Amino acid sequence: MAACAAPPPPLPDKPQPAGPEIQLVTTPVPFDPSNPARINLNGFTYMGGLAVTDPITNRLHGLSDLKITPDGRLVAISDFGDLFEARLQFGEDTRLTGLTDGKLWPLKRPDGQPVQGKTEGDAEGLAILANGDRLVSFERDHRIWRYPAAGGPPTVAPKPGNLFSENEGMEGLTEYPFAGPDAYLVGSEEGELWLCKLSAACQTFSVLNGPDLEFGLTAIAPFQDGSVVAVHRAWDPVRGSRITVSVYAAAALKARQPQPMARLTLQAPLTVDNIEGVALVTAPTGATRILLLSDDNADAKQRTLLMVFDWTGRK
């Protein structure tokens, strides 16, 4: 998709010297700009969304995946080798209202130094294991690094043995506690899914296809029972970004190419951008809360969007 768009402005190889603190500016966005009162579609309820910017540094771009910690902090990684953290703010009606306490750090290499440049720092997927360790998957130099919860440099984690093309690697990554505390799923843009463990080699798991061949997998997130939510993306210069958010039951994943039990489609005239991150939490009502994050490709024509939906298909 990025190859068809205008080239992004150049970004520095090294983080800005201002330190980890950043200034977040959040602007509410409606689900349907032509009908701001609309919030429902196919069993999904829109619970607020924000366009996120930072006037201090030019590093808050390219956010490619996110997770939510038990204490309510958003953790994301970027195409430019950065780790972003912020605290989610919700109103009395439990709708998303803002982000605060934003911080931005460079991801480190095993030698303790920051990753350098796009080739080394193109982070695409994020998982947080039960013990707090974080896994990050990278494109171009295809690898998965494990960052210890206690701090310190990363170590290499198992990855699928496939030969990925330079810019089509391990887009999807998520912890998968259903298969064990050290288990995680890895997904390629083609939809191929592998089950990996820190203690074992990766095994072919399933294939999650989008509505048609134009759609590529960008993100995955798990339910505790082994079900999975997957995000697929398509783009062309006429229709722009088209996104599907699909729910796959655990039993269906045993099939080679399972069919989703529910699917949300985001396309114009609805608010949409290049969604590359997804996370699941439980809403106060007991519904599944789905958080989506877009990668703006450091392009002025795109936005960093954080959107929240509650799905009532299961409680």
Image (cartoon, grey):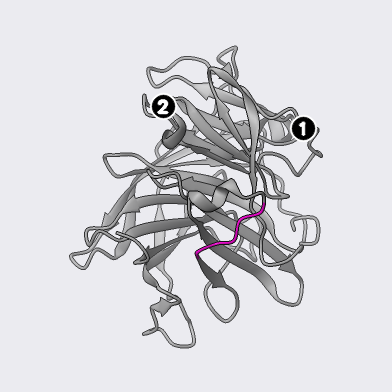
The circle drawn on residue 181 is: 2
Residue at the image position 46 percent from the left and 25 percent from the top: 182
The residue type indicated by label 1 comes to: Asn
Q: Is residue 42 left or right of residue 154?
A: left
The residue pinned by badge 1 equals: 162
Q: Position of residue 80 (x, y in %)?
A: 63, 39
Q: Position of residue 287 (x, y in %)?
A: 30, 61
Q: Can residue 123 be seen in this snapshot?
A: yes
Residue at the image position 42 percent from the left and 34 percent from the top: 177
Q: Secondary structure at mark 2?
A: loop
Residue at the image position 75 percent from the left and 35 percent from the top: 140
Q: Position of residue 78 (x, y in %)?
A: 57, 42
Please provide the residue range marked out in magenta: 257-261
User: How many numbered discs sit on the rendered protein?
Assistant: 2
> Residue 91 sits in which quadrant?
bottom left
Q: Quadrant of the C terminus?
A: bottom left
Q: Nearer the viewer, residue 78 or 69?
A: 69
Q: Residues within 10 Å of mark 1 (few under 14, many from 20)?
A: few
Q: Secondary structure at mark 1?
A: loop
Q: Is residue 305 magenta?
A: no
Q: Is residue 232 above or below residue 161?
A: below
Q: Is residue 295 above or below residue 157?
A: below
Q: Position of residue 134 (x, y in %)?
A: 47, 28
